[in-house]
Amino acid sequence: MQSIKNSLERLACVLAIALIAVSASADGAPTSQFGFKGWPYRNSAPCAAATRRPSAAPRPTQTPAVPSAPSTTVNVGDYTTLSVSAQEYSAWNLINEDRKAAGLAELPLDETLCALARIKAQDMKENKYFAHQSPTFGRAADMLKTFGYSFRSVGENIAHHATVLKSEAAFMSSDGHKANILGSQWSRVGVGVCLDDSGYVYLVQLFVR
């Protein structure tokens, strides 16, 4: 009888885990090039994300709301640097926390570069794509040249996640994105954030020298 009871308890546990997995796959979270690898990063309870279902329309983690990006049809030089949002400042601080942890100097925030990163984030939302190659601007280097931004080299990280914190965690679990964040060659960085219709973030990081 004891062995039958143990078998039934194990079966109930397996069914509970299966139900959690099904509910997590149906919660409307955006697709992304990133999976869950490395998400315990900065999380004292690594299993919490697997057992806690997010709301259907999560709210941004910072206020105020992110301002809309300038129109993507503007001509060269015909854009205005918008104020950096609280979420963008948060994303910038996360970059520098990871750089300091690696013994690297902090990167100053370039507000003009933030405006360009924000335009790219808005472009991904409006044109419904997620890629380094924009149908509007081409690649990051092409976009910076189009807007007359002076640089010698550029690196770009993009994410589509629930928060800027999870975006940075995903970046740091990916060798290529981590190499951009921890690059010693960069002299400044711009961070752009916009929200999709469910409140998730499109995040763009532009590293330049």
Image (tube, rainbow, N blue to C red):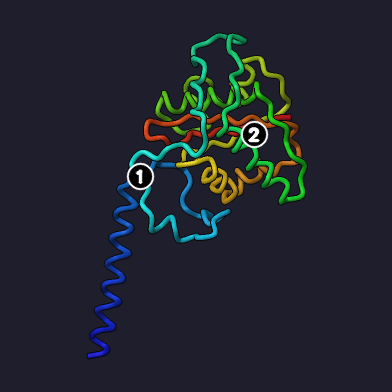
SS type, badge 1: loop
Q: Earlier in the sequence, mark 2 or mark 1?
A: 1
Q: Which residue carries the number 1 mark?
A: 55
Question: The N terminus is located in which quarter?
Answer: bottom left
Coordinates of residue 48 in the picture (x, y in percent): 44, 58
Q: Amino acid at mark 1?
A: Ser
In the visual, does 32 lie left or right of 175? left
Residue 156: mark: none
Coordinates of residue 2 in the picture (x, y in percent): 26, 89
In the visual, does 185 lie left or right of 42? right
In the visual, does 109 lie left or right of 91? right
Q: Amino acid at mark 2?
A: Gly
Coordinates of residue 41 in the picture (x, y in percent): 57, 54
Q: Which residue carries the number 2 mark?
A: 155
Question: The C terminus is located in which quarter?
Answer: top right
SS type, badge 2: strand
Q: Nearer the viewer, mark 2 or mark 1?
A: 1
* Residue displayed at 33% across by 50% down: 25
Who is closer to the viewer here, 153 or 85? Answer: 85
* Residue displayed at 65% across by 40% down: 93
Tell whether label 1 touches label 2 (CB within 8 Å). no
User: Eyeballing the image, is 7 above or below 130?
Assistant: below
The residue lying furthest to the front in this view is: 63
User: Eyeballing the image, is 57 above or below 151?
Assistant: below
- Spatial CA distance of label 2 from label 1 is 34 Å
